[in-house]
Amino acid sequence: MSGARMFSSTDRWLLKKLYAAIGSPSVRIALKDGPAVGPKDGHVVAGLVIHDRATLMRIVVNPEVAFGEAYADGAVEIQGGLLTLLDAVYCPMAARGNSSWYPRLASWWLRLSQGNTRLGSRHNIHHHYDLGNQFYQLWLDRNLVYTCAYFPEPSATLEEAQLAKMNHVCRKVWLRPGERVVEAGCGWGSLALHMARHYGVKVKAFNISHEQIVYARWRAQQEGLDGRVEFIEDDYRNIYGRFDAFVSVGMLEHVGREHYREMSKVIHRTIGDSGRGLLHFIGRNQRRPLNAWVRKRIFPGAYPPSLREVADILEPSDFAVLDVENLRLHYARTLEHWLERFESSRQQVATMFDDRFVRIWRLYLAGSVAAFRAGSMQLFQVVFAGPQCKAIPWTRAYLYQPQPQSAGRMQAAD
């Protein structure tokens, strides 16, 4: 057998291994100037061309990380559109875990090296959220809300949907004028400012991203709300004081399940047995780590919990779950908006960073769209209350009535 033919046979075997590992989707996978594999029925929606044998071997060994690195390096070519390709691959893979030992080992090592200790959390958050406010201003909504929006109608704009999300959260926690609220992980401050301005509460908001806190304080001063909202640059584990409500939107993913008991103690010492709270977080239907490439390049230390794991936060303090809502499709729509805006700003992003950074973030956003569409990722909102909480609405009707001037006008259940 000639060397060229032997390599062709090996390449075809590697391509078949890769194709089977990703669930045999409607995708054609080829080695540049070499063999290709694809669906038996010939129905192809997208294509992947791998530029060299070494890249192919790396992807076969660890598809999750190596494909991301290859795309970032320009070592693969996408035919038919990146999102189309990812949609086709994520659907058959949604229920599949990492079956081989190497991806599991890589995932385990990332978990060890990216632990969410107090020091580790600061490093992890700095990696993602302190890239510069100008970067995020290019593709988020004008209020810089970097969490799942809520679309009352599919045609709503991103700005409308983020405003609706903030009202949705405030209504669920049933805020009333004069109450005190603590927010763990406040981003650029939009929700805290919204709660104070429209619901008449006082807010203490904690965050360890320096750039976000500086911006949030500036906004509070500009909007005349610095007397009602206090932005504190500190770890959630250092939250003290007594409050009527605890709110966390998009922060639980950065806690890590090994710290859930700490989180439980923090919540209980702030709202006791009579308060209520809301956790808004990216989650899973089953216990499974976040994509290893995303943890390596985008969200170090991140872990999306299942609902069962979140019980480890609520059960030790005897918190009752009042409401659970899954906004998975809303997050897919949110990410579609972000991806579109990111693509429109890619030249500016490349100027700020470089072309490789653009490819990394394009893959992260497009992959997230595909993951939420396919159902491998979920977006949960869990409302809970202490056993002595009296501020519990009688029905859910208040969530869908026209926006009230104040949440305090609604009547509590006896």
Image (cartoon, rainbow, N blue to C red):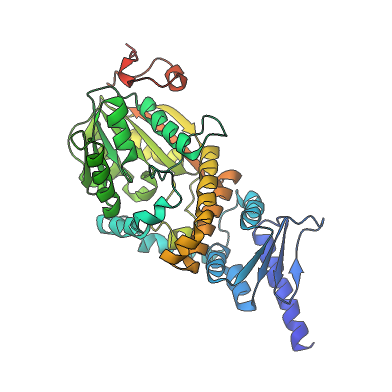
Residue 87 or residue 101, whichever sits in front: 87
Which residue is located at x 44 percent, y 37 percent?
162
Residue 340 or residue 4, whichever sits in front: 340
Which residue is located at x 57 percent, y 34 percent?
155
Asked which quadrant contains residue 81, the reply is: bottom right
Horizontal arrangement in the rendering, residue 271 relative to residue 41 (left or right): left
On the image, the x and y values in percent for residue 163 come to 42, 34
> Which residue occupies the extreme top position in the image?
414
Q: Where 122 sits versus 70, above or below? A: above
Horizontal arrangement in the rendering, residue 398 relative to residue 3 (left or right): left
On the image, the x and y values in percent for residue 149 come to 46, 38
On the image, the x and y values in percent for residue 247 come to 32, 35
Asked which quadrant contains residue 414, the reply is: top left
The reply to whether residue 107 is in sight is no
On the image, the x and y values in percent for residue 385 come to 32, 26
> Which residue occupies the extreme bottom position in the image?
2
Residue 379 or residue 126, whichever sits in front: 126
